[in-house]
Amino acid sequence: MSKIRLGVVAELLNYDWVTFTDLVRALETTGGNLGAHLGKLVEAGYVQEEKRFVNRRPLTRYRLTQKGRDAFAEHVRQLQSLLVP
Amino acid sequence: MSDVDEVQAREHIAMVDRILAQSQPRLCTGGEFFIVWGIGSAAVTTLFACIDLGMLPSVAAWWAPVILLACAIYSFVRARAARRTLASSSLLQREFFNVLWISVGLAFIADAAAFRLFPGIASAAIWSVVEAIVLLYIGMHGNRRALLCGVLVVVSLIVANFVGGFYPPFVLAAGMFLGYAGFGLSELLVRE
């Protein structure tokens, strides 16, 4: 999992739905970069995407799936195992 | 993972910690658990104090395991009912419930299986310590009422330590009732 994707998953951990704009702001990255990473996460089934219109303006938001939570926990475990001497 | 070295692993973990710390969501604490255990622990403490003072016959001590068992069964049944919600809750939320269950479980074990090590009022004081830990943990994550109630329980511990006569168990019971059960009630009222 790349650092940006790991950051996306970490951001989604504590909220039910997070908008694309909020993720861009939180991760301090560009929309294009984030969009590419989110696409991979959605494709892997880790993140659920919802697109709708609010006051005639498009709103895209994301939510972590259970598969995403499990993958995150496993990834963090593997990262921590790299730190053990 | 083969393309991540130790330095990158540290960076990634630090980033995750920072993000999780920054979001700091308020914990959903399940107010009813606090009411049940606050009243239960206060009731058992008061029960034994009354028996020691001769206000109740010694056979009344059998109510203590009944009360604690009732609290445990209620908690188990409610926790099972909330299992589906818990599965979709945040890591922080699940960690909190781990802290809660471990703390209450240990107090239960200390009372039931280590009663020679913690005789008399010491067994009640363990409950106060555990309740203070749980409340202060919640308070550390932004819940001021929990912080206040945790301090209240700690104050009851200190006052019970120094006050004389037959007051100590009643002071502890008051701390449990007002601090722990009181917090639970305030949580339910806020969420309505």
Image (cartoon, helix red, strand yellow):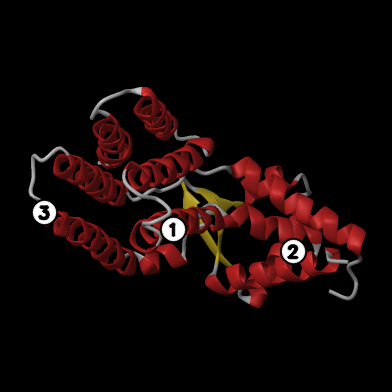
Q: Name the residue under label 3.
A: B60
Mark 3 Cα within 10 Å, few/some/many (few <14, many 20+)?
Answer: few
Against B160, residue B31 (above or below) is below
Split into 4 quadrants, where in the image is the N terminus of chain A? bottom right
User: In the rendering, at what x and y percent does residue A85 appear?
Assistant: 88, 66
Front tag of 3 and 1:
3
Q: Can residue A1 be seen in this view?
A: no
Front tag of 2 and 1:
1
Circle 3 chain: B
Side of A4 relative to B75 (left or right): right
Marks 3 and 1 sit apart, C-alpha to C-alpha, by 24 Å
- Number of numbered discs visible in the structure rendering: 3
Marks 3 and 2 sit apart, C-alpha to C-alpha, by 65 Å
The one of B35 and A66 positioned closer to us in this rendering: B35
Q: Mark 1 points at which residue?
A: B106
Q: Quadrant of residue A3?
A: bottom right
Same subunit, labels 3 and 1: the answer reads yes
- What kind of element bears circle 3? helix
Same subunit, labels 2 and 1: the answer reads no
